[in-house]
Amino acid sequence: MSSGARSGPRIVTNTVEFPYRRSLGPVIGTFVAALARGQILGVRSGERVLCPPLEYDPDTGAATSGEFVAVGPVGTVRSWTWVGEPSDRHPLDRPFAFALIQLDGAGTSLLHAVDAGGEGAMRTGLRVVPRFRAEPKGHTGDLAYFVPEGAETTDAGVVDGAALSPVAGGEPGVVLEPVETMEFWSSLTYREALSAASERYARSLLAGRLLGQRCPTCGKVYVPPRDFCAIDGIPLGEGDDLALPDRGVITNFTIVTPVKYPGQKETEPFVRVSVLLDAPDGQLSESGSALMGLQPVVDVTNEEVRVGMRVEAVWLPEAERNTDELGNRGWGSTSGALTGWRPTGEQDLSVERYIDRVF
Amino acid sequence: MSADQKAFGEPIAIVGYAISPMSAFSEDTEVRLCLDVVTRALAASGLGRKEIEFTCSGSADYLSGGTFTFVANLDAVGAWPPIRESHVEMDGAWALHEAWVRLLIGEERTALVFGSGKSSTGDLSRVLALQTDPYYLAPLGADPLSLAALQARALLDSGRATERDLAAVAARARRAAVTSPHALPALAAAAADASGTGGTGGTGGTDGGDDLGDQIDALLTADYVRSPLRAHDTPPVTDGACALVLATATVARRLAEEKGITPVWITGLEHFVEPHQPGTRDLTDSVSARRAAQAAGLAGGAPVEVAELSALYSHEEIILREALGLPDGCEINPSGGPLAANPTMATGLVRVAEAARAIQERGVSRALAHATSGPCLQQNLVCLLDRQPLGKEAHTSQGSSQEGGAR
């Protein structure tokens, strides 16, 4: 990213990841357990067998029987499409077909991948057989994909179901210990234009100045500028921007005790404070002052932080300032420009003067 | 309003609406898109912000990746002092449904509804795959385009449509896009170049014309993106927003008299949902769309003249046309529909606004708007709009006596 010549807005990217661990329940858990044995199970519901097996009948909403039935292994393609350029979320890294496959003995179809070699090999009505992961992981992915019946398997990671150890005969009433949970890693990357207001704020931080914006209707001061007033629902613009003092008072704080999760970098309890900035004319005023939330502190212990403490901004040296991480969210972030806020040593301000401005 | 002023079951009208410019990549924030349409819809209604008694919005935080983006979007309405407000993690058309029910109950007399989405921010094929069943579908990366293609193939295999029929839907959408103020500009420009018309036509609705035939031929030469779908059969990534203002009959008539507003009456609004697993239902039919249309009262009253359908893919229009049983003369998606602009989470609400526009600006008497949610038309909403408040009597069980004279 560059903050130099503007040939269009700066683009900011942001990746959100989450490691899900899902409970599978008795029905899907049993389906997954059978995959490790090279078997695909359906569940009986009234007169028909549902595959994939579900806890409730999709037509009636009634609980399904809990009676599992081995289906297939051969199935019929009921519809299909060709994925010429698979993404990293798809089950195959080479061109493949997505197909609705009705396994012999099942009354419904299962969505899955068919490794057909080429689009020309696909047609509705094609007979296909499953390929299972040679080393099962207790995941729906243990059913790797399907291939046209009679096709040779060249993929070393997968096997025909017969190569695993199916329950004898695949008879009705097979009882397997359900797999309890399955992991799923979600990752989404977002890309957006840095808004004009955020861009002005970023430039201001680089210059060592806090930039705010005042609504001409209600007088509320926002920091950073947003180009609208959330009270009056009106657009604001660059003409409403104003420079703000980098001094204020702590009106609220919290001490965060970090717990471990992917991406967590903190290990020790840390404090985050709300800072009500001095008004542009130097006086604190409830309506005419801006509040910055979730700010870090420096030169003060967690235990010493208190409501009413007067603080001032500690800027990074100009050469070290970097606002590349700044986006349109996290309003009031000073990351990359300030190291935090430190006590000035002045006398505390009494809470009555800003009781409505703790957030 | 006090209990004795309750107006249970009064007819509800749309008294204002606004649709944002449609963009493939908006440089504005989502709040600013919302602010624009909310401001313009209120101005069109003649109501001020403080006169709105209930607000409901539809959006999905997964689209922008921001935590509680829907709360940030409230900044567009001026939610201070606190307001009565709700949100659905669905298309704005379902926010309209919630607001409509609230007004029917009679506690509130005015409502603001908006839907918004910047689908350019993330990768829709990944985001929407995460909204599928997390056991059997999401782990396969079951993207919306692949699921739509399975439905299209099923329809073609049934013999009820051909690839040429799909291309004809796309060609008409493109023709309509040329003159639609709410089509994606790049798409409208490309369509104008391809047709060589530069702005004639735009009403679509018929299959005839050598010119259209040539365009269909041209479209059919394109490669598949997911067979049997070609790029023109699929919706463009679009950022946009839409807002509506609703009022009960008493307020709507006052606005008509005092401000010259033309109310558009909601005379039916219903939605139904089908099983999620695509392999458990007949993909060539839309049972839930048919039921919603029946429940909304499509069969009663005058024939629908304009239908704005959330047909995201060409084949969906064919399935919906059949399921809804639209009359032969009914004009479909004169706005260009989602093939011309598909602002995810606002697309359905835009259909309602476009149907209202057909009544307000083009003299149409009765129009239908449709919204959808989930893969392969899983859930469908039908909204009937009329120039006159001739809705189902069931909705006017009380207070109907005062309505009699006004008709």
Image (cartoon, rainbow, N blue to C red):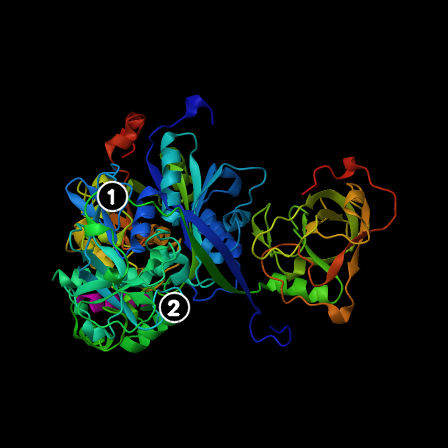
User: Closest to the observer: B173 or B63?
Assistant: B63
On screen, A98 above or below A2? above
> Mark 1: which secondary structure?
loop
Image quadrant assignment for residue B394: top left
Horizontal and vertical percent position of residue B371: 31, 50
Horizontal and vertical percent position of residue A149: 18, 67
Horizontal side of B351 relative to B281 (left or right) equals right
Q: Which residues are magenta?
A: B165-177
Q: Main secondary structure of the magenta part?
A: helix
- Residue at the limit of the structure toward the right, as seen here: A346
Image quadrant assignment for residue A26: top left
**Neighbours of disc 1 within 10 Å: few (<14), some (14-19), many (20+):** some
The numbered dot on residue A7 is: none
- The quadrant in which the C terminus of chain B is found is top left
Residue drawn at 66 percent across, 66 percent down: A323
The amino acid on which the numbered mark 2 sits, given as a three-letter code, is Ser
Tag 1 residue: A58
Rounded to the nearest angstrom, the CA distance separating label 2 from label 1 is 30 Å
Label 2 chain ID: A
The amino acid on which the numbered mark 1 sits, given as a three-letter code, is Pro
> Mark 2: which secondary structure?
loop
